[in-house]
Image (cartoon, helix red, strand yellow):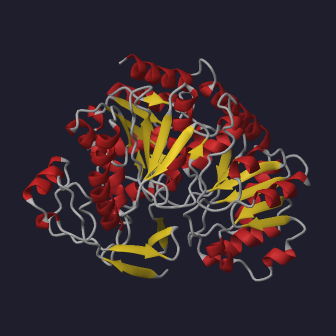
Amino acid sequence: MQIQEIGQIPMQRTAKGRQDPWRGITIQEVDMEEKLFWTKYWAEYPNQILPRRKFDDERYAFGQDGFNIYMLYYSTILFLNENLLPHLVTPLVPHLYCHINPMLQFSKRLGSEGLEVTLCTFSGNKSMPVQVGPVKLEPVSDDLQLDNDLKTVDAYLERFKAVATLRLPEIIAKRGISYLVYDSAIPWALDIAKHLGLPAAAFFTQSCAVDTIYYNVHEGLVKLPLAESSLSIDGLPLLQECDLPSFVYDIGSYPALLHTCVNQFSNFMEADWVFINTFTSLEDEVLNWMASQRPIKAIGPAIPSKYLDKRVEDDEEYGLHLFKPEIDICINWLNSKETGSVVYISFGSLAALGEEQMQELASGLQSSNSYFLWVVRETEQKKLPASFIGETSDKGLVVSWSPQLEVLAHEAVGCFMTHCGWNSTLEALSLGVPMVAVPQWTDQTTNAKYVTDVWQVGIRARKDDKGIITKEEIQRCIREIMEGDKSKDIKKNAEKWKNLAVEAVNVGGSSDKNIREFVAKLTCN
């Protein structure tokens, strides 16, 4: 990836000194009136000169140990129109695309309740649509570009915090915002809201089980590094080390991200509302335990209404895409296959399997008795065996990106081999698709535990002594889901959770009630 220096841009000050101080000057260089203005908004960052840069590929921010962090592609702020109802503003973590879709779907739900909603993004992406369903999108100039010193996760997160801390109060002041909903991963947004006298709500995008683990770490109820190989936490099943989020059992892997996950709870007791993307019947026990610590409202599953209750008009897809899905190719191919005959494989937008693992997976799929649709991002396709696509063209389809909801909803799909990211897990649960769990890192290992042992809608692929899932194990897992002894029970459970997901968001369901309660609170104040 090439980085092009644009250079420092001198600031043209207005009479009140409120032009962007983020454009090539230091806070210490501004006049006293200007300095007091930015200090008031929690944004005094002395001695930082921030040159503007651009990239030849806007999708990527930087890599660390082979892990690509997506740059500020769609980072979100949510508003309600002042002329109709109280304003609501929601900032999201920039590089984690999995945080964006749940908030967009929450916005659509609020819009379906009669609220005028605008989603304002910290992105200069010119291809962004101006509206998604009832939600208007308004881009804001993106100054979160990479500098030479941004070579670590925490450097990137600190830069994002600095930029957003400057931008957010400007937007709030400009639009007369009266309510803020913030991504729980940026708890400092609550400090801004309280400083400006605004009520605020936290929005958690991971499962309640995962959030509870991080909460226990924050409260000192779970000590790190772990002293035992298993862990007992109120509201959760007994967890082995391999069932915990990777940041917890391997605390040296990504310390900045561990801090971000744990720090979600630094001030959440002060939030006026707490929302979470799950539904009550799915995580009843742990939701009840968390509610004993402070009230928490489940509003999920936050996926398009077409696949659930069908009450939100024209809500057929998320509306924002990180990559361009090969829709026609996937659906036409699936249309030619029998019901329940296809294994769908996707490990999300971030996971990068090693070459040996890709070879084993390819071999396992090739020698299985099932058709397969495999999403292999363009950057990963070089890891496939040279002749694989040609040799498997009669039984398999490899695409660079898919319309995942459409694929999972297709009657031909009988199994989903997944990394168990929370969004993918909720989608599979909501559409009644059994899973083969192949977790990679972060919360995926805990989600996999629930998929297999709590919700009983799948099985977990086992690694060998080298940490590889062999082709024989791939074959075993597919066979077990598609035709094995456990297949009938797994499919029955998958159908049960599908029905409960629809029930949660339908009229009078648990999530529907929580959303309506929030809307009523906003509109009566």
Residue 366, quarter of the rendered image: bottom right
Left or right of residue 82: residue 67: right
Residue depicted at 71% across the width and 54% down the height? 403
Residue 21, quarter of the rendered image: bottom left
Residue 110 percent across, percent down from the top left: 52, 30
Residue 51 percent across, percent down from the top left: 30, 74
Residue depicted at 30% across the width and 58% down the height? 163
Quarter that holds the C terminus: top left
Residue 204, quarter of the rendered image: top left
- Observer able to see residue 225: no
**237 or 274: nearer the eye?**
274
Picture mark count: 0
- Whether 509 is drawn above or below 324: the answer is above
Residue depicted at 88% across the width and 46% down the height? 339
- Observer able to see residue 190: yes
**466 or 440: nearer the eye?**
440
- Whether 112 is drawn above or below 361: the answer is above
- Whether 390 is drawn above or below 73: the answer is below
Residue 88 percent across, percent down from the top left: 40, 34
**233 or 276: nearer the eye?**
276
Question: Looking at the image, which residue sits at the far front?
Answer: 15
Left or right of residue 345: residue 101: left
Residue 414 percent across, percent down from the top left: 79, 48
**252 or 523: nearer the eye?**
523
